[in-house]
Image (cartoon, grey):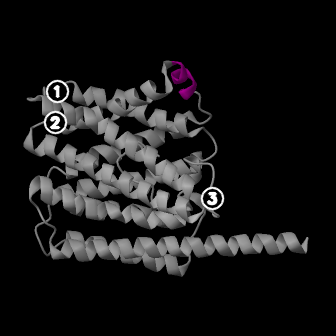
Amino acid sequence: MSASRFPQPPGAIGLGSETSRFNYGAAMPDRLKAVLLMCTAVSLFSCLDATAKYLGSYQGIPTSEIVWARFLGQALLMVIIFGPRSVPGWFKTKRPGLQLLRSLFMVATTAFNFIAIQYLRLDQTISIAFLAPLLVAALAGPLLGEYVGWHRAMAILSGFLGVLIVVRPGIVEFHPAFLASLVSMTAYALFMIVTRKLAGVDPPLVTLFYALLVGVVAGGFFAIPEWVWPATAFDWLLLLATGALGGLGHYLLIHAYALAPASSVSPFLYFQLMSMIGLEFLVFGDTPDRWTLIGSSVVIASGIYLVHRERIAHRESKDAAMEQQAAS
């Protein structure tokens, strides 16, 4: 996966860059394992956001420092797991420009999300983040030449309506952090578009490493001048855990997509809303308002419908290919 905290969105986003097989004949036990892995992965992403919010809002750790620790931690974890000898091979890319562009989008996604969660509830930021797969589907036409039909176009419009319900501009006071969350979501959608272009060009570990490398190098320029030493051993533990939470979450996510079709496991991405709400209540004592629940439900329903339409399109394409093969 990517190195950001966001899960892979369903739909026309090119999961092939992360896992090489779509086992459409997966046995039910594999599907159940995939669902469990997916739910665990998105729960780890929720823990990452909750940790970043706690360190920034309650312990006074600068956002730049948290972002840097998140990338540095996962980069070190990769080196430990795969060994230092693997590092030189991760620099070998056929499209360095696209890799750098993708990495910049990923860094922007993480940074603006961590800024947003300092001021917004976790359920609000994840509701906006869920709009990303819909925006990817909308942008796939002009950027990739993959235009959607009217069914999916209606799903995209419904998703935007859901975000408007969450934000309610002009009805309640608009906090600037909503803009940061929207920028984060947009950067993630562009990140996935570039990921689609890189599918099959470079190995997944190369793509992952470049994202971490840019995050470490660029993040250091902002984090080191603003560095604040964590006050307690627990704060140190949480800061160091950010990379592990993101890295382990992405590792489990990749395996979930390898065990079962994307159309089977992608709807469980939205389990993250439940884990966000639970952590929000347990850690910060906050509960979501009804408008956020309504708006997020609209976004989630739109996303699930988009997955459904993608599944139908895949089946129709497969049937057409079989008919053409039989005719020839």
Residue closest to the eye, 53 or 216 = 53
Q: Is residue 190 above or below residue 312?
A: above
Q: Residue at x 11, y 61 (%)?
A: 286
Asked if the magenta segment contains residue 166, the reply would be no
Name the element at disc 2. Answer: loop
23 to the left or right of 270: right
170 to the left or right of 107: left
Closer mark to the observer between disc 3 and disc 1: 3
Q: Is residue 111 above or below residue 127?
A: above
Of labels 2 and 1, earlier in sequence is 2
Residue under numbered circle 3: 23
Q: Residue 275: x and y, percent?
A: 26, 59
Q: Residue at x 62, y 57 (%)?
A: 22
Residue under numbered circle 2: 62
Which residue type carries mark 3? Asn
Q: Which residues are magenta?
A: 85-91
Q: Residue at x 36, y 65 (%)?
A: 270
Q: Quadrant of the C terminus?
A: bottom right
Of labels 3 and 1, earlier in sequence is 3
Residue closest to the eye, 57 or 140 = 57
Count the marks.
Answer: 3
Q: Residue 244: x and y, percent?
A: 33, 37
Q: Main secondary structure of the magenta part?
A: helix
Kindly indicate whether the residue at mark 1 contacts the one at mark 2 (C-beta within 8 angstroms).
yes
Q: Quadrant of residue 77?
A: top left
Residue under numbered circle 1: 227
Name the element at disc 1. Answer: loop
